[in-house]
């Protein structure tokens, strides 16, 4: 299986609560769009031995997890994944490029590679 670069991120949800998780590198900009750049801090890298998701399925998964922005009138706006990567074919193309950029030939010397099952356990909670 390919090795995928993950980022450890800390998301400040409120003054009293910060959540730390590891997510695939291409998810970090979506989290930043949801919570604001100033509330998302990258804490380091991890490497996960996992399958690469099909781009369309990953776009749908991210939309389902992170939802949509809200318009001024309170109605639902553009999905956060589309705000980051764009819409339609162009958005899928940009997301695919980001996914491919996160695939590495091998983890850096001394880095631990986590098997996909272990990574899933760590990602159980949504940021």
Image (cartoon, rainbow, N blue to C red):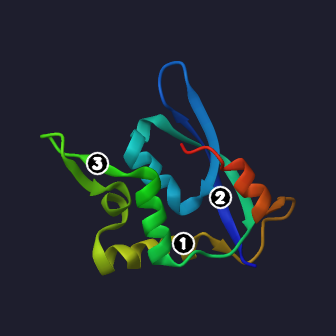
Name the side, left or right, on which 18 lies relative to 37.
right
Q: Quadrant of residue 25?
A: bottom right
> From mark 3 to mark 2, how far is it between C-alphas?
25 Å
Q: Which residue is mark 3?
A: 69
Q: Which residue is mark 1?
A: 99
- In the picture as drawn, the residue positioned furthest to the right comes out as 110
Q: Quadrant of residue 87?
A: bottom left
Position of residue 32 relative to residue 98, above or below, is above
Along the polypeptide, which appears first: circle 3 or circle 1?
3
> From mark 2 to mark 1, how far is it between C-alphas?
11 Å
Position of residue 18 relative to residue 99, above or below, is above
| Residue 68 appears in the figure | yes
Q: In this orientation, which residue lies closer to the viewer: 55 or 3?
A: 55
Along the polypeptide, which appears first: circle 3 or circle 2?
2
Q: Which residue is mark 2?
A: 6
| Residue 96 appears in the figure | no
Q: Position of residue 66 (x, y in %)?
A: 43, 51
Along the polypeptide, which appears first: circle 2 or circle 1?
2
């Amino acid at each position: 299986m390919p090795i995928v670069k993950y980022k450890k991120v800390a998301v400040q949800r409120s003054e009293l609560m910060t959540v730390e998780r590891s997510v695939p590198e291409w998810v970090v900009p979506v989290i930043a769009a949801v919570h604001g750049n100033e509330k998302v801090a990258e804490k380091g890298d991890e490497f996960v031995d996992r399958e690469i998701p099909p781009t369309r399925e990953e776009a749908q998964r991210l939309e389902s997890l992170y939802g949509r922005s809200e318009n001024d009138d309170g109605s639902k706006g553009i999905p956060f994944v589309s705000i980051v990567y764009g819409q339609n074919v162009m958005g899928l193309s940009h997301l695919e490029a980001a996914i491919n950029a996160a695939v590495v030939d091998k983890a850096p010397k001394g880095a631990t590679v986590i098997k996909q099952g272990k990574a899933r356990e760590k990602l159980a909670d949504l940021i």
